[in-house]
C-alpha cells in the first residue's frame, strides 16, 4: 500500500555538553590500578535537515515505519493516480501540525548524534545537557510504497513491513517457548555427552 508521509525541512542550532572518560590500567608490585580521567566536552554546530519523514497514518506503527527507512528521495515524482493502480492507498489522518513533535524529536536525536560523533578517543561518552534551537522550514506531503504482511500464530497477530523501494524488512517473529526449551535442553544434553566422552578419553 501507499502510506502518507509528511516531510519537514528545518535549520537547527544545537549545543551539547558531554562527560567523557578514559581509563588507564597499570600494574604495581601488589595490585592492578585503573585510573579514570574525566573530561567535559562542549560541542556546538548548525545543521540543515531536509525531508525528515513522519508517517501521517495512525494505523501504521511509527517504529516500523522508521525502521524500514531510508527511502531514496531522489526518486520522488509528481503524484499520478496511475501509481495507485492495483494498490491500496491511505489518506493521512495525522495532519502536519500533529506530526511536528515527532519530527522535532527526530531532529533532536539526529543533531545530538552528529555532535556526539565528534567526541572521539574516549572509552565512554555520556550526554549531560543539550539545547536545540530549530527554525521551521518547508513542509511537504508524499506517499511511499510499503508492503505489509499480517499473519497469525497461536492466535497472536504478527506483522511484517517492507520498504517497497529498497526491500528492507522489519517485523516480529513468532516465538515458540516449548520448542525453544527443547532446543536448549537438547544442546545441554549434547554438550554433557561430549564432555563425558572427553573426560573418559583422558582418564
Image (cartoon, grey):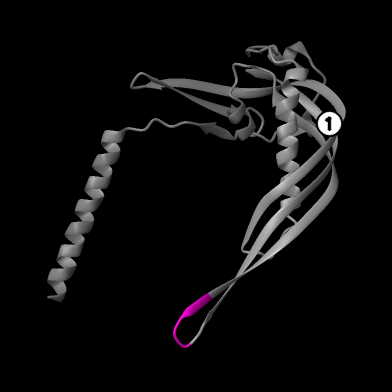
Looking at the image, residue 188 sits to the left or right of residue 8; the answer is: left
Which of these two is toward me, 68 or 39? Answer: 39
Q: Residue at x 71, y 33 (%)?
A: 105
Would residue 189 be counted in the magenta stretch?
Answer: no
Q: Nearer the viewer, residue 58 or 87?
A: 58
Write down the region rendered in magenta. 29-33
**Residue 46 position by quadrant:** top right
Quarter of the image for residue 85 reads top right
- Horizontally, residue 76 falls left or right of residue 27, namely right
| Residue 94 placement (x, y as % from top left) | 70, 15
Is the C terminus in the top left, top right, bottom left or bottom right quadrant?
bottom left
Q: Quadrant of the N terminus?
A: top right
Q: Position of residue 36 (x, y in %)?
A: 60, 69
Q: Dot 1 lies on which element?
A: strand
Q: Residue at x 87, y 29 (%)?
A: 137
Q: Main secondary structure of the magenta part?
A: loop
Q: How many neighbours does mark 1 have within 10 angstroms: few (below 14), some (14-19), or many (20 or more)?
A: some
Q: Picture coordinates of residue 199 (x, y %)?
A: 16, 70
As drawn, is 122 to the left or to the right of 33? right
Q: Position of residue 193 (x, y in %)?
A: 17, 58
Q: How many marks?
A: 1
Between 39 and 89, the residue placed more toward the observer is 39
Residue at 47% in and 31% down: 172
Point out the residue furthest to the bottom here.
29
Residue drawn at point x = 62 percent, y = 26 percent? 62
The vertical placement of 117 against 101, above or below, is below
Front residue of 37/153: it is 37
Residue under numbered circle 1 = 9
Q: Is residue 132 above or below residue 195?
A: above
Tell me: residue 185, above or below residue 42: above
Amino acid at each position: 500500500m501507499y502510506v502518507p508521509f509528511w516531510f519537514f525541512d528545518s535549520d537547527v542550532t544545537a549545543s551539547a555538553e558531554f562527560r567523557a572518560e578514559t581509563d588507564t590500567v597499570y600494574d604495581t608490585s601488589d595490585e592492578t590500578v585503573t585510573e579514570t580521567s574525566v573530561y567535559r566536552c562542549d560541542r556546538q554546530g548548525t545543521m540543515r535537515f531536509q525531508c525528515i519523514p513522519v508517517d501521517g497514518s495512525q494505523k501504521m506503527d511509527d517504529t516500523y515505519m522508521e525502521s524500514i527507512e531510508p527511502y531514496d528521495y531522489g526518486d520522488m515524482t509528481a503524484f499520478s493516480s496511475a501509481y495507485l493502480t492495483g494498490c491500496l492507498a491511505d489518506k493521512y489522518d495525522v495532519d502536519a501540525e500533529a506530526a511536528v513533535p515527532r519530527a522535532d524529536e527526530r531532529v533532536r536525536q539526529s543533531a545530538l548524534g552528529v555532535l556526539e560523533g565528534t567526541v572521539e578517543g574516549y572509552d565512554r561518552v555520556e550526554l549531560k545537557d543539550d539545547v536545540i534551537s530549530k527554525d521551521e522550514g518547508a513542509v511537504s506531503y508524499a506517499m511511499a510504497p510499503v508492503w505489509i504482511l499480517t499473519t497469525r500464530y497461536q492466535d497472536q497477530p504478527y506483522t511484517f513491513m517492507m520498504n517497497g523501494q529498497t526491500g528492507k524488512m522489519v517485523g516480529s517473529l513468532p516465538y515458540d517457548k516449548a520448542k525453544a526449551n527443547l532446543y536448549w535442553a537438547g544442546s545441554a544434553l549434547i554438550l554433557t555427552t561430549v564432555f563425558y566422552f572427553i573426560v573418559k578419553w583422558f582418564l
